[in-house]
Image: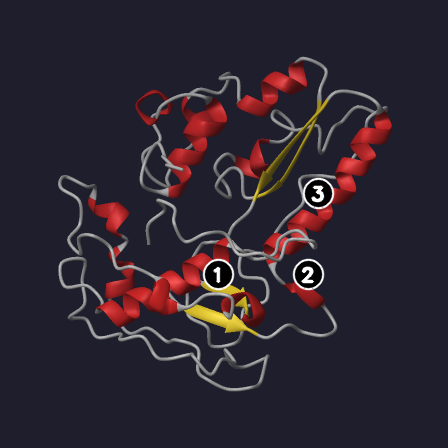
Amino acid sequence: MNAYCQQSICSPSRNSFMSGKRPQNTRVWNFINDFREEFPFLLSFPQFFKQHSYWTVGYGKLYHPGHPVSFDEPLSWSQNASSADDPIPAYPPYKRDSGKSAGCGYFDVCPTGIDPKRGRDQFVDHHTATQVMGIMDIAAKARRPFFIGVGLIRPHLPFIVPEDTWAQYNESDMKPPASLSPPVNVANISLNDQVFQGTHQFCPDGADIAADCPSVERRTLPTDTGISPFNPFDAENIRFLRHGYYAGENLDACPDRSNPPSLNHHRRV
């Protein structure tokens, strides 16, 4: 399958998708504003359903946090409804880096042991999926039209993934990109050159879930400032990053999901 996004960064694409308008029409091209600031009365995707008597609820990362404010409730969602006959909780917060080991940097790959007290629910997408399955039961029993929007975060840096999911992939099966150079005329912001600036701390090897990224395959990524979009990581580290991406894509978000997706798709890291 081919996947497309409206713009090569998060907030503009989410504002575009959720509003049904292209970035040149929402006037959102970065992380500064949102479509509600530019066009307060623009009808969002879930808002359309809500205005047509649907019960609309959202979970996870649908809008970029803070753009619009409060995940656009109560305009987009029945959550936080002021009506006395439809009192339901506000849009649930989520922790993007839930389960992250201490010392795990933002631009990092962190195969992580599963805390026996929390189980897989320590990972944000599994927690979101658990919430959604519960709300689907409630929605079905209510016997009214409903719309449920769900935004799963992984794969997203840092690649915080369960060790058993990490082990399902073999880096030797991962092909390097056809070109190591950035696309022609790409916007600079999409290259995300923050990873190439300054000193970066990557999580260490070890067996302590609270302090380390416990994996025998864990290795240290280079952090020198000589690496840039035009002088990229070597093939070994590219495969390592892709390993984190694919494992993040298959976070066993649903309890009965165990088979990893095929590597033969068109997403790129």
Please tell me which of labels 3 and 2 falls first in the chain. Answer: 2
Is mark 3 in CB contact (under 8 Å) with mark 1?
no
Please identify, in this view, whether the residue under mark 3 or under mark 1 is nearer the observer.
1
Relative horizontal placement of residue 20, taking residue 224 as reference (left or right): right
| Residue 6 on image: x %, y % | 35, 31
Q: Nearer the viewer, residue 40 or 217?
A: 217
SS at mark 2?
A: helix
Q: Residue at 29% of width from left, 63% of height from top?
A: 195
* Mark 2 neighbour class, 10 Å CA radius: few under 14, some 14 to 19, many 20 or more: some
Q: Is residue 112 left or right of residue 237?
A: right
For marks 3 and 1 on the same chain, the one whose residue lies earlier in the sequence: 3
Amino acid type assigned to the residue bearing label 2 in the image: Asp
Q: Quarter holding the C terminus?
A: bottom left
Q: What's the amino acid at mark 3?
A: Val
Q: Position of residue 2 (x, y in %)?
A: 37, 36
Instruction: Report how far apart the C-alphas of labels 3 and 2 lie in the structure.
Output: 13 Å
Q: Which residue is at 21% across, 75% downward?
A: 224
Under circle 3, the secondary element is: helix
Where residue 127 sits, quadrant-wise, is bottom right
Residue highlighted by disc 1:
247
Q: Nearer the viewer, residue 29 or 182?
A: 182
Residue 171, quarter of picture: bottom left
Pointer 3 residue? 132
* Residue, disc 2: 121
Taking the spot 42% from the left edge, 79% from the top edge, the residue there is 218
